[in-house]
Amino acid sequence: MAAILPLRFRILYLMSTKKDSVKSEDIMKELESDYGKEKQFKKKAMDGHLISMRALGLIEISDVSIDEKDELIEEYKISELGITRLKYLPKAYK
């Protein structure tokens, strides 16, 4: 990929390449090499990005569960609206 996208666009692109839903931890693992040194690249901030993207209708929750630490685990997938927004990505991401 040529340019580094703003994080939310990169999350949207990543979800568009996945057949299955993804957790915030999965997203962080995949994007760590590009965004790992940024202040916003923390679990709490990532959850905030995902909540915002969901509120905008770009992604949707596909599954919810509780892990062994009694923490809520949400899995996300790209929505139809999110798919239509992929046209705004640079050519290197199409």
Image (cartoon, rainbow, N blue to C red):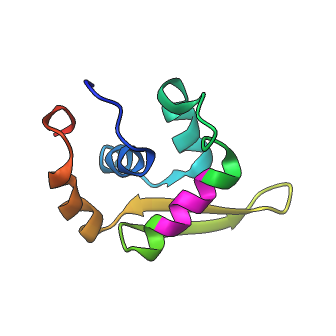
Quadrant where the C terminus is found in the figure: top left
Above or below for 48 versus 88: below
Asked if the magenta segment contains residue 50, the reply would be: yes
- Picture quadrant where residue 14 is located: top left
Compared across the picture, whether 61 is left or right of 79 comes to: right
Compared across the picture, whether 67 is left or right of 74 comes to: right
> How many numbered marks are there?
0
Above or below for 64 versus 35: below
Above or below for 90 versus 79: above
Q: Identify the residue at horizontal 25%, vertical 24% (top origin).
A: 2
Task: Give the residues in magenta.
Answer: 46-52
The picture places residue 92, in percent across and down from the top left corner, at: 18, 31
Asked if the magenta segment contains residue 83, the reply would be: no
Q: Identify the residue at horizontal 18%, vertical 63% (top origin).
A: 84
Helix, strand or loop: magenta stretch: helix
Compared across the picture, whether 55 is left or right of 10 comes to: right
Q: Identify the residue at horizontal 53%, vertical 58% (top origin).
A: 49
Q: Identify the residue at horizontal 60%, vertical 63% (top origin).
A: 74
The picture places residue 75, in percent across and down from the top left corner, at: 54, 60
Quadrant where the N terminus is found in the figure: top left
- Picture quadrant where residue 36 is located: top right
The picture places residue 31, in percent across and down from the top left corner, at: 49, 34
The picture places residue 42, in percent across and down from the top left corner, at: 67, 43
Residue sitting farthest toward the front: 39
